[in-house]
Structures are given as C-alpha cells and as structure tokens.
Amino acid sequence: MESIKGKASRYLLDTHVLLWWLFDDPKLSGTAHDVIQAPDNTILVITF
C-alpha cells in the first residue's frame, strides 16, 4: 500500500486489518498504518 501525499484515496479493509490498526499490532506495516491514519483518506471496512 503506498500513499500519495496530498491526494485523498479510498481504501477497503477487512476486519483483521482494522483490528491490527486499532490494537497497534506489529503485523500491520508502517505504511498501512499511515495510510489508515491519514485524515484525507476514506477508509471502508468489510466484515463477514
């Protein structure tokens, strides 16, 4: 996942990625963490 600075994007996450981000799990890469946290990005979560 690569973020483009200054450009808003939409990302679709599954439940695992959301939980990794919420609990600051080391399984989530630094880049993914930054993308999820960027205020200009729209984050959508899919659950089953």
Image: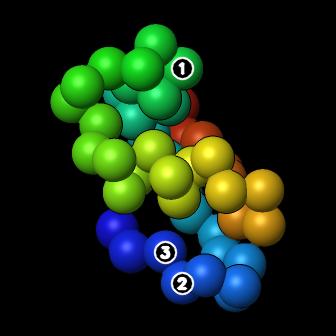
Front in this rendered view, residue 43 or 33: 33
> Which mark is first along the chain, 2 or 1?
2
Q: Residue at x 78, y 56 (%)?
A: 39
Front in this rendered view, residue 12 or 39: 39
Q: Is residue 19 visible?
A: no
Looking at the rendered structure, the secondary structure element under dot 2 is: loop
Looking at the rendered structure, the secondary structure element under dot 1 is: helix
- Amino acid type shown at disc 3: Ser
Count residues near mark 1 (Cα–Cα under 10 Å), then give few for <14, some for 14-19, many for 20+: few
Q: Is residue 33 visible?
A: yes
Q: Which residue is mark 3?
A: 3
For residue 18, above or below residue 30? above
Distance of label 1 from label 2 (alpha carbons): 23 Å
- Amino acid type shown at disc 1: Leu
- Whether residues under marks 3 and 2 lie with C-beta atoms below 8 angstroms apart, the answer is yes
Q: Residue furthest top?
A: 23
Please name which of the two marks, 1 or 2, marks the residue nearer to the observer: 2
Front in this rendered view, residue 13 or 7: 7
Q: Which residue is mark 2?
A: 4
> Which mark is first along the chain, 1 or 3?
3
| Colour logic | rainbow
Q: Position of residue 9 (x, y in %)?
A: 65, 76
Count residues near mark 2 (Cα–Cα under 10 Å), then give few for <14, some for 14-19, many for 20+: few
- Whether residues under marks 1 and 2 lie with C-beta atoms below 8 angstroms apart, the answer is no
For residue 1, above or below residue 36? below
Distance of label 3 from label 1 (alpha carbons): 19 Å
Q: Residue at x 53, y 58 (%)?
A: 35
Q: Residue furthest left?
A: 27
- Res. 22 mark: 1
Count residues near mark 3 (Cα–Cα under 10 Å), then give few for <14, some for 14-19, many for 20+: some
Q: Position of residue 41 (x, y in %)?
A: 71, 64
